[in-house]
Amino acid sequence: MSEVKKIATRVSYGNALVELGNEHDDLVVLTADLAAATKTDIFMKAHPDKHINCGIAEANMTDIAVGLAATGKVPFASSFAMFSAGRSFEQVRNSIGYPHMNVKIGATHAGISVGEDGASHQCNEDIALMRTIPGMVIINPADDVEARAAVKAAYEYVGPVYLRFGRAAVPVFNDENTYRFEMGKGIVLKEGKDVTIVATGLTVPESMEAANMLAKDGIDAEVINIHTIKPLDEDLIVRSAKKTGKVVTAEEHSIIGGLGGAVCETLSEKCPTPVYRIGMRDVFGESGSAAALIHKYELDAEGIYRQVKEFLK
Amino acid sequence: MENLELQKTANEIRKGIVTAVHAAHAGHPGGSLSCADIMTYLYFEEMNIDPKDPKKADRDRFVLSKGHCAPALYSALAHRGYFPVAELETLRKLGSHLQGHPCMQHTPGVDMSSGSLGQGISVATGMALSAKLSNDSYRVYTLLGDGELAEGQVWEAAMFAGHKKLDNLVVIVDNNGLQIDGPITEVCDSNPIDKKFEAFNFHVITIDAHNFDEIRAAFAEARKTKGMPTAIIAKSIKGKGVSFMENSVAWHGVAPNDEQYAIAMADLEKVGEALCQK
């Protein structure tokens, strides 16, 4: 296999912010003493006057962003997912969600690919938390091309958006020249008839590879990339479920309340279908390299392949 | 506006508070009455606002961080002409634009939804920062309770506002000394409040919250203060103006019944009549 370029989506976030900042005066980027880690330092170098460091105070940063949005700015409040969605949940719920403020939350270091820092910093609950807030858009991009497009789409959209990025470098599989991001629309990466794999984030290329492995066993898997978890592309998922009759979800998140939860809720109401959820199975993560953790918790191609096979037995 | 006119207006705003809470059979009269004079001064004297154009871009902003005192904000807005005073009686009722806690999408003149304590001061700080970023001249005011000061986020915001030298921000603490579970000195003492804000690099002014000379002087001093935000510690009487509610923890979040309402309104009528004799 030829060398695949790898870029962490948090880097894509920083780069996209710079491009947006070049074009738009109303953009303000906030961080809570994590400029280097969330990659807003890339923006800070380009637009120092529009980069606000709030210190280690995520709840305050979230509401500072609300004040900026209430007075016409478009703020991107940046921290680790653990703090953006976890520590600041009530700020997001009451001051961003309830008044439907035009605040963008840039949450990096989501999921277990945080790696060595361990479970305290590996947020596997953020999608579930954000999904319960009325009007919140949730985007979990899979690679650099998709992440940069998502950041720009979030800017253009008026209303709250939760953007989820990873720490670890992940393969760039989308083609910059042909890729088109449409908020709320899933992308069928491979058509199939035996099983549907609905994936998001770093499990998308892993699911594609798993589908290739399944093909060798004569199993024709359909692979769908769901970058927007809310609003969910229900029509696409229901259509695929009707065709294949079996659905597997794959995400770097708890199997409770995330993509798997969302797909189950949709299918049980609109097209009852057996579903298997791949993700963190109601456990905390641990320290280790991102690759080792993704392998251990079976979010890599090998793990997805094994679990799909088991499900289809 | 002369002090006498401000006093008369504040008395009308107090009547609106009591009437709204009585009609709702619920709400927070004590802390609403304690801040009524401050609210009167803000909405009738201090702030650059236009009830006919509630969203004008260069208006001064107000965030009621102690959002449970919505009746005071609603009564001030109604008397200032943002909506009919009669609508105060719809407070907290299904379909009313007057939600239990302020909601910016429903009520004209409300600059920020609030109610979860500790968040309003952060939002106000963000608004003040926003003005600095785009060289806008509007000022930002936020009102906190003294019990609210136990919220850690208040001090995150204070640290940031002091650090950023936001001299377009005025933080007012309605220091009535009582919170829902008892006196602040017994629950979790926030004193010394002035020294805390000084330590967070605020210019601090302590006043009698019911003396319009002191209120006027404090806001004038805040305007002249450059390079740091101002905190006005307003020593107030919870339930001010209604005899049986004054300095009583019991009236934090309880509505008067019909009999109590009649006494309360009679108290306020008496104050109004005395002011008319002046």
Image (cartoon, coloured by chain):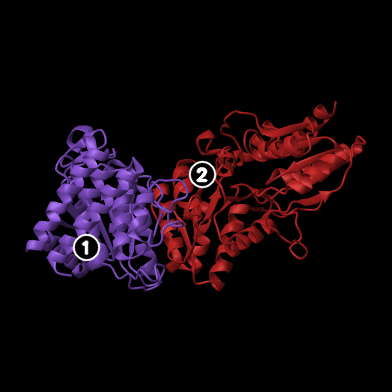
Describe residue B37's horizontal placement relative to residue B77 as left or right.
left
Describe residue A275's horizontal placement relative to residue A36 as left or right.
right
Residue B78, quarter of picture: bottom left
Estimate the x, y position of residue B36 in percent, counting from the top left: 22, 54
Give the colour in which the image draws chain B.
Answer: purple
Describe residue A45's horizontal placement relative to residue A151 as left or right.
left
- Estimate the spatial distance between the alpha carbons at disc 1 and disc 2, rounded to whole Å: 39 Å
Q: Of all residues shown, which one is farthest toward the left?
A: B278
Up the image or down, A285 lies above or below B144; here it is: above
Q: Residues within 10 Å of mark 1 (few under 14, many from 20)?
A: many
Of residues B33 and A228, the one nearer the viewer is: B33
Of residues A228 and B22, the one nearer the viewer is: B22
Residue A245 is labelled as none
Amino acid type for the residue under numbered disc 2: Ala
Estimate the x, y position of residue A97 in percent, counting from the top left: 50, 50
Q: SS of the residue at dot 2?
A: helix
The residue pinned by badge 1 equals: B41
Up the image or down, A158 lies above or below A305; here it is: below
The residue pinned by badge 2 equals: A85
Q: Do marks 1 and 2 both belong to one polypeptide chain?
A: no
Determine the residue positioned at 71% across, 33% down: A277
Q: Would you say residue B146 is visible in this rendering?
A: no
Q: Are marks 1 and 2 in contact (CB under 8 Å)?
A: no
Amino acid type for the residue under numbered disc 1: Tyr
Q: Quadrant of the C terminus of chain A?
A: top right
Of residues B93 and B104, the one nearer the viewer is: B93
Up the image or down, B222 lies above or below B95; here it is: below
Q: SS of the residue at dot 1?
A: helix
Give the colour in which the image draws chain A.
Answer: red
